[in-house]
Amino acid sequence: MKLRVVALAVFLALGTATSAAADPEPAAPEEEVSVLATNFQLPFPCGQSWTGNSSGSSAHQSWEIDFNRGGSPDADLGDPVVAAASGTVVISAHQGSTNGFGNLVKIDHGSGWATYYAHLNTRSVTAGQSVSQGQQIGTVGKTSRPGNNISAHLHYEVRQGDGYPGNIRKAVFNGATFGYPIQTVTSNNCGGSTNPYTPTEVCGSGYSVVDSAGLGTAGTVYLLYNNSNGYNCVVTLKRTSLGTPTAVTAYLEVQGSTRITDSGSFGYYAGPVRAAAPGKCVKWGGKAGSSVYDSPFEHCGS
């Protein structure tokens, strides 16, 4: 059995901020402290890097953010969207002609705090459902009101209380306020504070996440690439039964080569599985609990 060392993190709950005016100014220090207390993470799987832009749409108010990471207009279509913090789903519906949100998920985090995830291609949660931080709630899309043609992206908002747009708050990810108006952020949304490992930690220095797939509520499998040496790496991180050995699998197959697999009973993750793949397509995947993911041959050369 592999030894996985648990690193515990302690988060301090602080007071609630007062409501901003209808035309919000940058948050006061005491408001910033309150925002940090919510412990939000990026609404994308652990290790992924996304570029947020708060000024790219004329429809934006205050601190709303549009997220993309692909190089073409619809490159992000269908990518997983996860809960920024635990809470209760209060809206999971297509907004139709009501507004430009299209498929919308709203999560209530308590004490007046809520997050909004708009333009989703699909929704995987229902109103009234409890969700954990890092749980998949849908996929990136481009749904909106009829006749409003947009490219795929995630529109993300944090609100506190009522009175839009004065209730919009600055987004905070992993304890750091988003660098408005534009910043690229790497996700630490790794199933909350319980699993102390990230894909980049497991694969090692020089690797970055290029893709991921959810394994239900049991875990997530990640594909990483190292530009300096041309190696791919696959790791499956558990989200349940942490610290208890359960069946987990990670595999990587370079086209034309034999598949490499790490499979067994592990406390926190399976992998890392590494293989040189410069200029070649790879097939990758894994298993946690009863959920399995198997990719086609893809990511050719990266």
Image: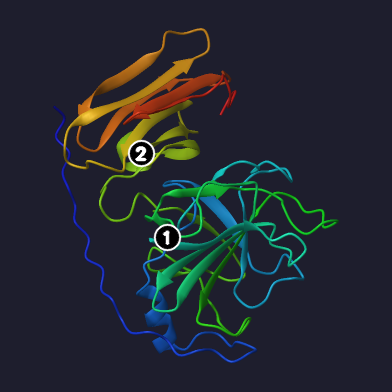
Contact (Cβ within 8 Å) of mark 2 with mark 1 = no
- Helix, strand or loop for disc 2: strand
Q: Residue at x 25, y 52 (%)?
A: 194
Distance from the alpha carbon under mark 2 to that under mark 1: 17 Å
Amino acid type at image mark 1: Gln
Left-right relation of 181 to 198: right
**Which quadrant is home to the N terminus?**
top left
> Mark 2 or mark 1, which is nearer to you?
2
Residue nearest the observer in this picture, 220 or 227: 220
x, y percent for residue 69: 61, 48
Q: Residue at x 71, y 43 (%)?
A: 74
**Quadrant in the picture for residue 259:** top left
- Establish if 46 lies above or below 118: above
Q: Is residue 132 visible?
A: yes
Q: Is residue 204 visible?
A: no
Classify mark 2: residues with Cα within 10 Å, few (<14), some (14-19) or many (20+).
many
Write down the residue under mark 2. 219
Write down the residue under mark 1. 41
